Amino acid sequence: MNSDLQKILVDEQTILNRIDELAGQINSDYAHLESIVIVSILKGAFMFTSDLLKRINVPHVVDFMALSTYGAESKVSGEVRVIMDLRHPVQNQHVLIVEDILDTGLTLQFLERILQTRNVASLKTCVLTQKEGKENNLINIDYLGFTIPDVWVVGYGLDYADKHRTLPYIAELKPEVYT
Ligand code: PRP
């Protein structure tokens, strides 16, 4: 294991098993629709999106939006920036947002506001991880993978200063790495 890591919190097989379950729920809930639009939030959601969509059998297109709340360092700026917008309009589309983590909730709140102004037909959220104690009444998660401890996590898309994103599992970062 990389020396920056404290311990593995969710191993690869556990992630994939849970994604099987989430995909099953999504396939069943959207079975009556002709097509849906998956909005994947970069960079963090790229691995989750890939594994999830391999298991989705509802006709869909995938589009990407890149949003950023944290700078290159560990300090939260409290501000969400659109780095890259969607390629296609989503008006009258059934949209499912795919996110890697809900921490402060700023990113999802911001995104939901933007997408509602584009007059989507419906909007749901699929989030792989939510930090314990960070439940937020303003945000409804329709499909949640795991609740994880409120520590700095990396891997499976999640990063520290853009590092450790491609690990196949979710791990806790050693506090001395970011303090
Ligand atoms: C991370 C993560 C989520 C967001 C969650 O993205 O991927 O999008 O923070 O945090 P929040 O609930 O406090 O808003 P980040 O801004 O670090 O960009 P990245 O996906 O490119 O790593």
Image (spheres, rainbow, N blue to C red):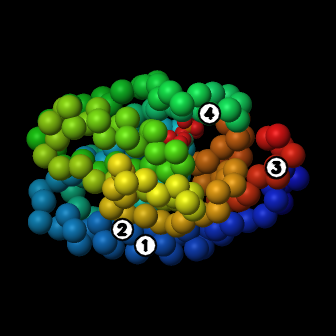
Q: Which residue is mark 2?
A: 23
Report the mark closest to the observer, 3 or 2: 3
Which residue appears at 37% of the width and 58% of the height?
Answer: 141
Q: Which mark is residue 76?
A: 4
Q: CA distance from mark 3 to mark 2?
A: 34 Å
Q: Residue at x 54, y 65 (%)?
A: 147
What residue is shown with label 3? 175
- Please tell me how crowded label 2 is: few (under 14), some (14-19), or many (20+) other residues with Cα within 10 Å: many
Residue appearing at x 60%, y 73% in the figure: 13
Among the two numbered marks 3 and 2 on one chain, the one whose residue lies closer to the N terminus: 2
Query: Residue placed at 33% from the left, 61% from the top?
Result: 142
Q: CA distance from mark 3 to mark 4?
A: 16 Å
Give the CA separation, mark 2 to mark 1.
5 Å
Circle 2: element type: helix
Measured in 3D between alpha carbons, the distance from the residue under mark 4 to the one under mark 1, in whole angstroms, is 33 Å
**Label 3: few (<14), some (14–19) or many (≥20) C-alpha neighbours in 10 Å:** few
Q: Earlier in the sequence, mark 3 or mark 4?
A: 4
